[in-house]
């Protein structure tokens, strides 16, 4: 069971305020940008883009976008520097001085190409169904198909995949009106989150890194499970009670509101840290001046105050 996030906001706010750093993982489609009938029609709202830019510019915050989209497609859609981009459900990644493609997934490309050809032949007669080859994975979209045709899509999909599933050459996952074909590797959004967290601990000076993961899809459940008992996980949508996330939000507008609040908390936190540092430096400066003055008095370089 999960809780409406705003009902637990004081606790969430306290966790964020006390963190030494934030690792913010965000799904794209259905979390930051509204879903559409075709992936090409999905666009990031300008206000959300500006908030992401500001979050990524804060010291101590690392923003990672994690999506089922191809890496190049995700980068083109968001087009912001300073972010970590993770495509194909964690199989490829690019960030500052960091680039990785899962080698086992790369080796599976010829098989995926053959499957894509078979699926296109099988689904070609069905209106509203189409195949997207994303290099390291395949997606069958049927968001625009009728309910009756959705059954035909499912039957055609598994019939085309049967020989490859029997040989365990690929594995299948599902999402919102999609079927996905992935390489048979033990790597997903959850394992990528763990890998990035471990790497960040090594490369960052922050003592306590708080992971925050926000997503709306079945594939995000892999990350929610990986972060059970650790960090803040938020599922987005109306029917989310069975999710393994700790909290839930109803809409993308609420996600935007949460990101704004995280930004405000961190700015206040950094402001207090700067003020604390300034006071410390000022105190040290005053103590240094007093020490130099005492030394000068002792050496007779200046007179001490004399009472009348």
Image (cartoon, rainbow, N blue to C red):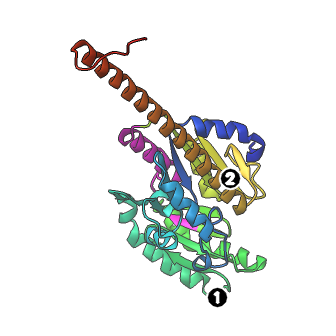
Q: Secondary structure at mark 2?
A: strand
In front of the other: 142 or 83: 83
Disc 2 marks which residue?
A: 235
Of the residues under marks 2 and 1, which one precedes in the sequence? 1
For the record, the magenta segment spans 180-205
Label annotation for residue 204: none
The quadrant the C terminus occupies is: top left
Residue 289 x %, y % = 34, 25
Residue 114 x %, y % = 44, 76
Name the residue at the front extreme: 308
Residue 108 x %, y % = 40, 65
Name the residue at the bottom extreme: 125
In front of the other: 173 or 163: 173
| Residue at x 27% of width, y 20% of height | 302
Disc 1 marks which residue?
A: 125
* Residue 186 painted magenta: yes
Q: Is residue 195 above or below residue 301?
A: below
Residue 29 x %, y % = 61, 66
The quadrant the N terminus occupies is: top right
């Amino acid at each position: 069971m999960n809780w409406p996030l705003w009902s637990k906001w004081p606790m969430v706010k306290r966790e964020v305020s006390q963190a030494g750093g934030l690792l913010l993982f965000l799904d794209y489609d259905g979390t930051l940008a509204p879903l559409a009938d075709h992936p090409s029609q999905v666009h990031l709202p300008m206000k959300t883009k500006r908030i992401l830019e500001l979050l990524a510019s804060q010291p101590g915050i690392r923003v990672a976008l994690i999506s089922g989209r191809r890496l190049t497609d995700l980068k083109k859609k968001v087009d912001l520097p300073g972010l970590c981009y993770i495509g194909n459900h964690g199989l490829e990644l690019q960030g500052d001085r960091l680039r990785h493609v899962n080698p086992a997934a790369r080796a599976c490309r010829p098989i995926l190409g053959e499957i894509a050809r078979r699926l296109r032949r099988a689904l070609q007669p069905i209106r509203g169904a189409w195949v997207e080859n994303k290099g390291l994975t395949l997606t069958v979209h049927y968001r625009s198909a009728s309910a009756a045709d959705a059954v035909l899509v499912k039957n055609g999909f598994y019939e085309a995949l049967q020989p490859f599933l029997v040989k365990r050459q690929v594995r299948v996952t599902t999402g919102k009106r999609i079927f996905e074909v992935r390489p048979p590797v033990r790597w997903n959004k959850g394992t990528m989150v763990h890998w990035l967290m471990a790497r960040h601990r090594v490369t960052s000076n922050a003592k306590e890194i708080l992971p925050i993961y926000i997503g709306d899809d079945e594939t995000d459940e892999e990350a929610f499970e990986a972060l059970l008992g650790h960090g803040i996980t938020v599922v987005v949508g109306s029917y989310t009670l069975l999710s393994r996330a700790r909290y839930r939000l109803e809409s993308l507008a609420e996600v935007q509101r949460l990101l704004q609040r995280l930004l405000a908390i961190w700015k206040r936190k950094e402001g207090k840290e700067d003020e604390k540092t300034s006071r410390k430096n000022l105190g040290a400066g005053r103590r240094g001046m007093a020490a130099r003055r005492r030394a000068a008095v002792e050496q007779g370089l200046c007179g001490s105050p004399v009472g009348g």
